[in-house]
Image: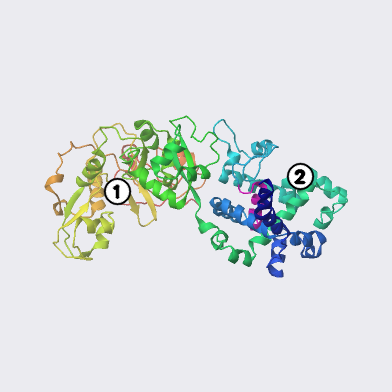
């Protein structure tokens, strides 16, 4: 019985293994492609005739090909991101296989020298490239952050040694060790540095660069793709990149997987940086997890309907700080959940924001109603006195054409005289008018005058300003019954100041001009102003009877 076991073991285990090792196969790749791969690493094409390169190709057997495919399949989760990051940094695609040689695409792999991750960062190098390590997270295992750090390190090595194959070898044995080897050999020629008898480099480094070349050659072997039905692997794994989703701290991956409907093993494989398989315990902070694009989209829909987040619409006078205090959420969490905020310098009324947590009881159902009431109270009916167009009305009332169509179903582009049109009127009337003759804005700024009752002419100008804002008599704009508001008590209009053109005279200074118009030099030099002068009629009797519609002072007499 014992002999029978040995015989069966020899037939079914040893013989296939030995046959695979002895099955030397040539690589089916064109010479042009070989040269292209070597040039991508800055290796001279003459290296194809070197004994090291020939022996490397001859040692490729079926077992190595199968191992290559297995490793490539294992890295299919990370390859799309790695390829995109390398391409963005203008680093050759061949370095994708350097990660394969370093870690066999095992993102959580660790060596006996305490190197870890896809790119096998040593603790000291990781700290230098800002990869942190805590009790809960090791960023050396983070597939995206570690790749970004590896790219920075490789670019530094390339700047020092000027050739990509030297950068790869320095990555393995250290830049100091490589510099000593080049100095000892008297050249940086790859064939010389790989000399086994001289031993310029450690055996591990000599094998390292050759294994990268072999992996790159196998990746371009058309036969291995066809025979093993692995086309999907060489298409960079359907280009399903990893994207970030944010969750509150303290949750385990098992809990999150159930919550978002994603297989736990998949979630774990995408996030090897979590040492304890759970997010750090700070529940007031958001932490990211990686998921492939297709699963991430499903998870987002699941999260949106789970009640863990809600949509808040920005209200008047809201700021990001006030919103964070109102809902007890950190500003960093708000920005993480709302990446579109980076496109805006200020919040816009009605802008939707995703808030983590459940809405307060007094906020439920009030958001939509308050936004709707604000809009509802601004809807008025306008009756044009002449034929016009929808586009002209949109410009007149600063309404979008789409909004006008929504308020007036069935409306056409042509608007007829007497036709009643609903528009949204802005209650905050702007106090800025355009000075057509000068091509700049004339600001109506507040007065420093302490008098509480404005002059009659000032009120008249203010009324004309408001009429010009809507360019229609008040009789033509009738508010709808639902939007009738109680009349506000009349507020005194601020004094109106006009812009004037002043011709400089000889020996005049900014100080003298400012004193003449009751201003300061700082007012004259205010950024963005085109010499907007502030005139007080009471203190400038010479100009008291001047026509208010004039924007120029009487021309000064030229001195001889």
| Residue 271, horizontal then vertical, whole percent | 52, 42
Q: Is residue 63 above or below residue 276?
A: below
227 or 535: which is nearer to us? 227
Residue 349, image quadrant: top left
Residue with the mark numbered 1:
548
Residue 96 magenta: yes
Depicted 35 relative to depicted 496: above or below = below
The answer to which quarter of the image holds residue 117 is top right
Horizontally, residue 381 falls left or right of residue 401, namely left
Q: CA distance from mark 1 to mark 2?
A: 78 Å
Q: Is residue 184 visible?
A: yes
Does the magenta stretch mainly form a helix, a strand or a loop? Answer: helix
x%, y% of residue 8?
65, 52
Asked if one can make out residue 163 in the rendered structure from this viewpoint, the answer is no
Helix, strand, or loop for circle 2? helix
Magenta range is 91-105
The residue positioned 43% from the left and 31% from the top of the image is: 284
Decide if residue 115 is on the left or right side of residue 398: right
**Secondary structure type for disc 1:** loop
- Residue on which disc 2 sits: 175
Q: Decide if residue 265 is on the left or right side of residue 75.
A: left
| Crowd rating for badge 2 (residues with CA inside 10 Å; few <14, some 14–19, many 20+) | some
Disc ID at residue 295: none
Q: Is residue 327 above or below residue 106?
A: above
Q: Residue at x 52, y 44 (%)?
A: 269
CA neighbours of label 1 inside 10 A, class few (<14), some (14 to 19), many (20+):
some
The picture places residue 283, in percent across and down from the top left corner, at: 43, 30
């Amino acid at each position: 019985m014992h002999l029978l076991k040995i015989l069966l073991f020899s037939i079914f285990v040893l013989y296939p293994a030995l046959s695979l090792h002895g099955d030397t196969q040539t690589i089916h790749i064109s010479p042009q492609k070989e040269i292209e791969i070597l040039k991508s690493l800055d290796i001279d094409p003459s290296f194809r005739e070197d004994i090291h390169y020939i022996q490397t190709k001859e040692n490729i057997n079926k077992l190595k090909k199968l191992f290559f495919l297995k490793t490539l399949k294992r890295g299919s989760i990370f390859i799309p991101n790695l390829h995109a990051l390398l391409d963005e940094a203008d680093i050759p695609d061949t370095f994708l296989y350097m990660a394969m040689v370093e870690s066999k695409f095992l993102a959580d792999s660790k060596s006996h020298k305490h190197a870890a991750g896809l790119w096998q960062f040593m603790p000291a190098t990781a700290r230098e490239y800002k990869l942190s390590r805590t009790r809960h997270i090791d960023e050396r295992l983070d597939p995206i952050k570690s790749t970004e750090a590896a790219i920075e390190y490789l670019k530094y090595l390339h700047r020092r040694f000027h050739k990509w194959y030297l950068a790869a070898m320095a990555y393995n044995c250290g830049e100091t060790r490589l510099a000593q080897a080049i100095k000892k050999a008297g050249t940086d020629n790859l064939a010389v540095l790989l000399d086994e008898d001289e031993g310029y480099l450690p055996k591990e480094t000599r094998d390292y660069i050759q294994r990268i070349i072999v992996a790159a050659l196998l990746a371009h072997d058309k036969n291995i793709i066809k025979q093993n039905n692995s086309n999907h692997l060489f298409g960079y794994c359907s280009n399903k990149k990893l994207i970030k989703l944010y969750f509150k701290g303290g949750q385990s991956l098992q809990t999150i997987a159930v919550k978002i409907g994603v297989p736990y093993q998949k979630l774990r494989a995408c996030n090897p940086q979590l040492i304890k398989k759970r997010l750090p315990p700070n529940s007031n902070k958001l932490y990211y997890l990686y998921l492939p694009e297709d699963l991430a989209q499903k998870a987002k829909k699941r999260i949106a309907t789970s009640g863990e987040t809600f949509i808040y619409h920005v209200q008047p006078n809201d700021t990001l700080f006030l919103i964070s205090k109102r809902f007890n959420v950190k500003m960093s969490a708000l920005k993480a959940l709302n990446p579109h905020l980076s496109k805006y310098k200020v919040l816009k009324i009605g802008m939707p924001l995703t808030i983590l947590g459940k809405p307060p009881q007094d906020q439920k159902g009030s958001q939509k109603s308050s936004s709707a009431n604000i809009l509802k109270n601004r809807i008025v009916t306008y009756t044009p006195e002449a034929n016009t167009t929808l586009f002209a009305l949109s410009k007149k009332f600063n309404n979008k054409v789409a909004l006008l169509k929504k308020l007036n179903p069935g409306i056409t582009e042509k608007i007829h005289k007497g036709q009643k049109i609903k528009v949204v009127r802005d209650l905050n009337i702007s106090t800025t008018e355009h000075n057509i003759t000068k091509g700049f804005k004339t600001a109506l700024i507040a007065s420093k005058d302490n008098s509480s009752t404005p002059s009659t002419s000032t009120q008249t100008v203010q009324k004309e300003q408001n009429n010009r804002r809507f360019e229609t008599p008040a009789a033509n704009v009738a508010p709808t019954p639902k939007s009738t508001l109680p009349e506000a008590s009349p507020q005194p209009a601020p004094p109106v100041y006009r812009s004037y053109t002043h011709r400089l005279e000889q020996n005049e200074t900014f100080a003298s001009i400012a004193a003449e118009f009751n201003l300061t030099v700082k007012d004259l030099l205010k950024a963005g102003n085109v010499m907007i002068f502030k005139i007080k009629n009471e203190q400038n009797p010479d100009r008291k009877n001047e026509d208010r519609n004039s924007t120029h002072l009487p021309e000064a007499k030229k001195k001889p």
